[in-house]
Image (spheres, grey):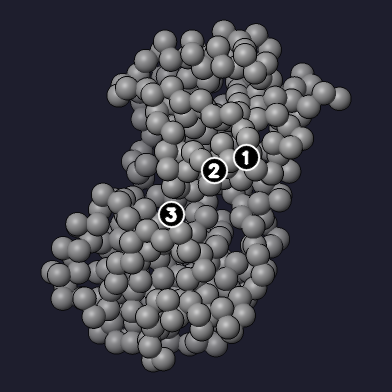
Amino acid sequence: MTPPRVLQVVLRLDPGGTERLVIEIVRRLHARIPMAVCCLDAPGAWADRVTALGVPLHVLGRPPGFHPRLSLRLAAIARDMRADVLHCHHYSPFVYGRLASYLAPGTRTVYTEHGRLSDSPPSAKRRLANRLIMAGARDLYAVSHDLRAHLLQEAVPDRMQVIWNGIEPGDAPTPAAREAARALLGAGPGDRVVGAVGRLDPVKDFVMLVEAVALAARTRPELRLAIVGDGPERAAIELAIARLDAGEHVRLLGHRDDARALLPGVDLFANSSTSEGISLTLLEAMAAERPIVATRVGGTPEVVVAGETGLLAPARDAAGFAAALVEAAADPARAAAWGRAGRRRLLAHFTIDEMVRRYEAVYRRQSAV
């Protein structure tokens, strides 16, 4: 059977979870399924990871606002490569991809929604638009059951299915890897390091995490928070550190390409988001056998089993999150057992091999229709 041709459609290839998954799909499949990538906005900092694979990259340079004519250019790209599938990641790419599919006969859309920008209730405007744009759309996917439930409230058809995100598990961390990571983190022998990784964006609510650690440190003064990442919320986080006089307990490490290599050095991994799909950094922490303390939002409870792989706390609740940190830090042996259980759960449900296998089946089914 002739392999399908797939055009991946994204906003841009800046560092982020969705972008990592798109690049991984392309990397793992392009040798047997012809691929190209189209960025609606700008190429992004990771664009060279696609071109280095010899995979064509198209950039449309969309200006702010909605521009239906952009779908004409997207359709032309699809026709030129004789694409069978437009795999659209997030809502805006799907809207443009859906319009383009009408202008590129034989091309079908696959839509994956990776998350929400906030925990706001469903939008009436979005419900109305979805009744039109989703009509006849077949392959619709969310990365968590919670996200699917939200999208159904926005009039997405109930045929939407779930494909969990996945990562490459790698090897379990060794004592030497933990020692090297703690050295990179500047952790002393008596420090209990709480690690957090992510773009410094309001949805990650790192200000609340700083507040929680400052509260927890009153009971557990050995706690040290290390935040890896950069973004627009950095100034607000720095103000929170100064306001709470928490400089002794909080370090901002900035963006680091070796963030995953630091994870074996943390004692607890924290995720303080107000909204999540399936967080890749949570999965990476589980691969490193780290116990988790996370907010009970989005797809996180599908990843973290409270009392088995970590603890869950309410979002936007510094006192509640602090209590969970104190509880997790109180029993290192139990926390280590949670970490080992987390890696087992990752291997069973959240590997990149399983995720890519499922999307490859979707592509091949679409091209056979």
Q: Earlier in the sequence, mark 3 or mark 1?
A: 1
Secondary element type, mark 2: helix
**Residue under the point 51% across and 25% down:** 58
- Placement of 294 over or under 328, stated as above or below: above
**Residue under the point 66% across and 55% down:** 351
Question: Outermost residue, bottom direction?
Answer: 190
Quarter containing the N terminus: top right
Quarter containing the C terminus: top right
Crowd class of label 3 (few under 14; some 14 to 19; many from 20; radius 10 Å): many
**Residue under the point 71% across and 49% down:** 354
The image shows residue 353 at horizontal and vertical percentages of 71, 51
The image shows residue 19 at horizontal and vertical percentages of 50, 42
Q: CA distance from mark 2 to mark 3?
A: 31 Å
Is 366 left or right of 183, judged from the image as shown? right
Secondary element type, mark 3: loop
Q: Which picture quadrant has residue 224?
A: bottom left
CB of mark 3 within 8 Å of CB of mark 1?
no
Q: Give amino acid for label 3.
A: Val
- Placement of 39 over or under 26, stated as above or below: above
Residue to which mark 2 is pinned: 49
Residue to which mark 1 is pinned: 53
Is 258 left or right of 272, judged from the image as shown? right
Q: Earlier in the sequence, mark 2 or mark 3?
A: 2
Q: Give amino acid for label 2.
A: Arg
